[in-house]
């Protein structure tokens, strides 16, 4: 799911919440906070795929541009300590939510100009940076406002509403786009979709001006940029001083080599016409099948994967988690061969794939937590690990469109399964001791 912010200490929760929320309970702001965190993220990583395809971009162009936008989440750990030095976390969260709403509103306007494609890509890059920075601010507010016990109590709320944002952004909004595009054309129709998303995020931001707790970290506020930079260097040096860290980095980089390529191309395959090798689904069909049914399957798979890893232990469970995440890619290979026309059959097949994705994705999250984060700076090292994971995912997605264009959809989906073999081999080599132990 989302990554934690990089704190220049050991990330123990701060206790200086000054102004209470509207009702004094985290239930009044945790759900809306994590819906707001997920909304712009899934706009950039999911909804934008259909937008750029409707604007006439090729698979190779779409995957390359969207993979480049993913760099915002790769490098965000590097500036997160500087955000920790700002005094008011509530104002920071609200500011980036409003900035995200303004950016999506600007996309809606830009789509109706002669420069729609470059403006859309440029503004999506801004939205990616805003979203990545909002991740840091919102996670920091959550950590600083709640005790360890409260954080655990509301962890389920985090995941639930983050995935509700996923269903809204990858399910409801594509469904709406199909209707609006049919009636008003691509520019006006997609402009309306981004306007809806902008208004939703703006409404949450306005609500959060009262609902969010105010947290001030006076000690952090006194830290200079130079002090924060020195601490960041210490955090990075400590990470690379850990025993076995290069094995861990390579493992995390390769973990999504197959799935990352598949996710970059999946919606394009579903949307492209049958004559071009795709399934020819409408935006409504994709939104309902992949955005809503797929999200439900992903959540169920994530829960099942967590229990499976807890029952068997991460080392023993890891090979099965890798297989579960990548073997269902053969579902897409079958779809590219059979070209079924039944929506229910397609939705069922996609649900199997997203269940496997959720089931296996637990593996890399737990690996980063248990093998890379432990030590003096656990939260900071976990955040850096998520940056490494994002780098691997972005690299896989960047070349996926080019590979798919060369191989064709059928052979490309087989290739995604083959791409997972290196990390599958590594999954049998994870040592018993924690890699995170100091050298």
Image (cartoon, rainbow, N blue to C red):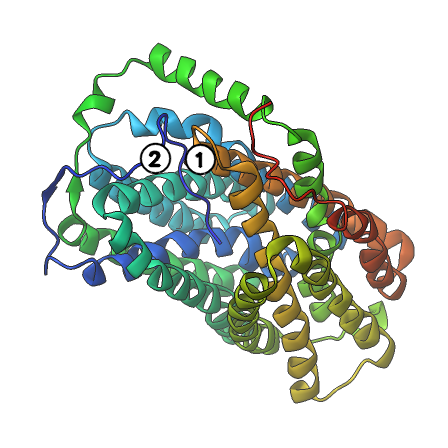
Horizontal side, residue 320 vs residue 81: left or right: right
Can residue 56 be seen? no
The percent coordinates of residue 172 (x first, y second) are 46, 72
Mark 1 or 2, nearer chain start = 2
Q: Nearer the viewer, residue 237 or 432?
A: 432
Question: In the image, is 422 to the left or to the right of 57?
Answer: right
Residue underneath mark 1: 378
Q: What residue do we see at 17% from left, 25% from top?
A: 218
Quarter of the image for residue 87 reads top left
* Depth check, front residue: 95 or 144: 144
Q: In terms of secondary structure, where does tag 2 sit?
A: loop
**Residue 48 percent location from the top left of the image:** 56, 55
Describe residue 37's horizontal placement relative to residue 51 as left or right: left
Q: In this view, does 194 lie above or below 221?
A: below
Q: Residue 288: horizontal and vertical position, in percent? A: 55, 77
Q: Which residue is drawn at 41% across and 33% down?
A: 6
- The reply to whether residue 347 is in sight is yes
> Residue 55's mark?
none
Residue toward you, 95 or 334: 334
Q: How far apart are marks 1 and 2 (CA)?
A: 7 Å
Question: Which residue is pictured at 61% across the width and 36% down the height?
Answer: 435
The quadrant of the rendering that contains the C terminus is top right
Q: Where does the image place residue 287, in percent across and percent down from the top left?
A: 55, 73
Is 99 drawn above or below residue 415 in the view shown? above
Residue 161, placed above or below residue 38: below
User: Helix or strand or loop: what does disc 1 sit on?
Assistant: helix
* CB under 8 Å between discs 1 and 2: yes
Q: Write down the residue under mark 2.
A: 11
């Amino acid at each position: 799911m989302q990554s934690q912010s990089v704190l220049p200490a050991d990330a123990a929760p701060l206790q200086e919440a000054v102004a209470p929320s509207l009702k004094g309970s985290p239930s009044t702001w945790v759900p809306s906070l994590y819906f707001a965190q997920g909304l712009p993220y899934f706009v950039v990583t999911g909804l934008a795929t259909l937008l750029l395809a409707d604007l006439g971009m090729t698979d190779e162009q779409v995957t390359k541009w969207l993979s480049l936008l993913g760099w915002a989440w790769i490098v965000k750990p590097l500036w997160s300590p500087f955000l920790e030095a700002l005094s008011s976390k509530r104002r920071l969260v609200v500011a980036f939510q409003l900035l995200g709403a303004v950016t999506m509103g600007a996309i809606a306007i830009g789509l109706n100009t002669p420069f729609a494609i470059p403006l859309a890509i440029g503004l999506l890059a801004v939205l990616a940076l805003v979203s990545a920075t909002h991740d840091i601010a919102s996670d920091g507010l959550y950590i600083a406002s709640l005790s360890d016990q409260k954080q655990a109590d509301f962890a389920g709320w985090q995941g639930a509403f983050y995935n509700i944002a996923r269903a809204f952004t990858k399910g409801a909004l594509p469904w709406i786009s199909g209707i609006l595009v049919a009636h008003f054309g691509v520019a006006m129709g997609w402009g309306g979709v981004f306007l809806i998303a902008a208004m939703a995020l703006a409404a949450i931001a306005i609500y959060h001006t009262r609902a969010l707790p105010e947290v001030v970290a006076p000690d952090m506020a006194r830290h200079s940029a130079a002090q924060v930079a020195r601490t960041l260097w210490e955090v990075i040096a400590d990470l690379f001083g850990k025993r076995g860290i290069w094995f861990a980095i390579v493992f995390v980089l390769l973990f999504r080599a197959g799935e990352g390529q598949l996710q970059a191309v999946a919606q394009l395959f579903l949307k492209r016409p049958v004559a071009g090798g795709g399934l020819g689904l409408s935006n409504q069909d994709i939104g309902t099948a992949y955005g809503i049914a797929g999200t439900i399957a992903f959540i169920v798979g994530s829960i099942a994967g967590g229990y499976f890893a807890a029952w068997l232990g991460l080392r023993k469970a890891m090979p099965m988690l890798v297989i579960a995440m990548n073997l269902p890619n053969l579902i897409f290979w079958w779809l590219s061969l059979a070209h079924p026309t039944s929506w229910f059959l397609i939705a069922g097949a996609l649900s199997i794939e997203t269940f496997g994705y959720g089931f296996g994705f637990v593996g890399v999250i737990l690996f980063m937590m248990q093998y890379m984060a432990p030590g003096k700076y656990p939260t900071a090292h976990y955040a850096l690990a998520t940056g490494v994971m994002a780098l691997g995912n972005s690299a896989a997605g960047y070349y996926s469109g080019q590979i798919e264009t060369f191989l064709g959809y059928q052979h490309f989906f087989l290739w995604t399964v083959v791409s997972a073999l290196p990390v599958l081999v590594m999954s049998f080599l994870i040592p018993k001791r924690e890699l995170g132990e100091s050298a």
